């Protein structure tokens, strides 16, 4: 199959900041607050809405930690967890204001960037600006075969999938959680994989804690 229709904006639409025109539209705050999201997607339950949002936030931040840790160990790019958490929060507030999907980290996109030699903050800024300014012209990507996009991602991750050195270096319960997370991710999706990893870690930690208390007693 192909990518298909991509939502676009008119080249004249968007915000004007002096001579600079940004092709995004800020949505009306009152209109956003009145959108019946819970009724449309969660059977009218605000509890389900908040639980889903909390799970997404947790899994998304775990993804960010994984990406940042990988760049730190392989490329000596330092990172700071509170800063990343704040950045994700501000990004998602901005995304909601313009009607975008939630902002998240992507291991595959990050690995593709690293494969091309882009590891600096400037590369990230340029990528973001290109995405924004190319929105009115994204329809040219509609006939792109999905297989071509998949091949780009596979080329970036295949080495770590075939020979996961960091995974094989784990020991004990960390190895069990790592293998379980990797297998679940491969069979289902990254979101379910991260979630399964969290559950496995919590369960194993509780069991290990009980065993240590018994030994002490």
Image (spheres, grey):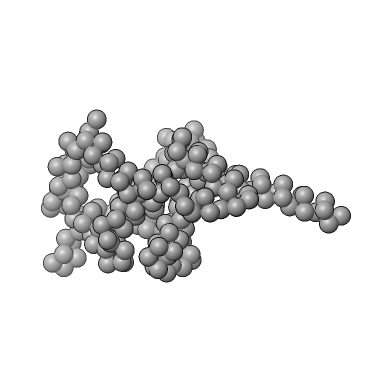
Identify the residue at horizontal 47%, vertical 52% (top origin): 165
Looking at this view, is 78 or 4 the one in front?
Answer: 78
Q: Which residue shows up at 19% across the image and 65% down it? A: 17
Q: Residue furthest right?
A: 217
The spot of residue 118 in percent (x, y) is: 28, 61
The residue lying toward the viewer, choosing from 214 and 90, is: 214
**Left or right: where 156 falls relative to 9:** right
Q: Name the residue located 32 percent from the left edge and 49 percent from the top edge.
A: 156
Q: Quadrant of the C terminus?
A: bottom right
Is residue 51 something that shows in the picture? no
Q: Is residue 90 left or right of residue 24?
A: right
Residue 98: x %, y % from top left: 30, 52
Instruction: Give x and y (percent) for residue 157.
Output: 36, 47
Residue 41, by quadrant, is top left
Could you tell me which residue is drawn at 23 percent across and 59 percent down? 129
Measuring from the top left, give residue 60's x and y in whole percent: 45, 51
């Amino acid at each position: 199959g192909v990518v298909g229709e991509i939502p676009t904006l008119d080249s004249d639409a968007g915000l004007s900041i002096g001579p600079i025109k940004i092709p995004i539209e800020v949505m009306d705050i009152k209109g956003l607050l009145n959108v019946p999201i819970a009724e449309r997607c969660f059977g009218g339950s605000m509890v389900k809405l908040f639980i889903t949002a909390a799970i997404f936030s947790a899994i998304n931040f775990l993804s960010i930690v994984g990406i940042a840790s990988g760049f730190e160990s392989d490329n000596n790019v330092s990172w700071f967890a509170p800063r990343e958490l704040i950045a994700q929060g501000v990004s998602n507030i901005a995304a909601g204001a313009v009607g975008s999907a939630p902002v998240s980290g992507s291991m595959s996109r990050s690995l593709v960037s690293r494969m091309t030699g882009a590891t600096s903050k400037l590369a990230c800024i340029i990528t973001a600006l290109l995405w924004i300014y190319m929105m009115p012209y994204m329809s040219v990507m509609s006939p792109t075969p999905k297989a071509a996009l998949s091949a780009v991602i596979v080329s970036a991750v295949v080495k770590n999938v075939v020979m996961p050195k960091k995974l094989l270096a784990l020991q004990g319960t960390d190895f069990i959680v790592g293998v379980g997370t990797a297998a679940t991710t491969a069979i289902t999706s990254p979101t379910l994989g991260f979630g399964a990893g969290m559950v496995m870690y919590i369960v194993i930690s509780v069991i290990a804690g009980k065993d240590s208390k018994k030994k002490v007693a």
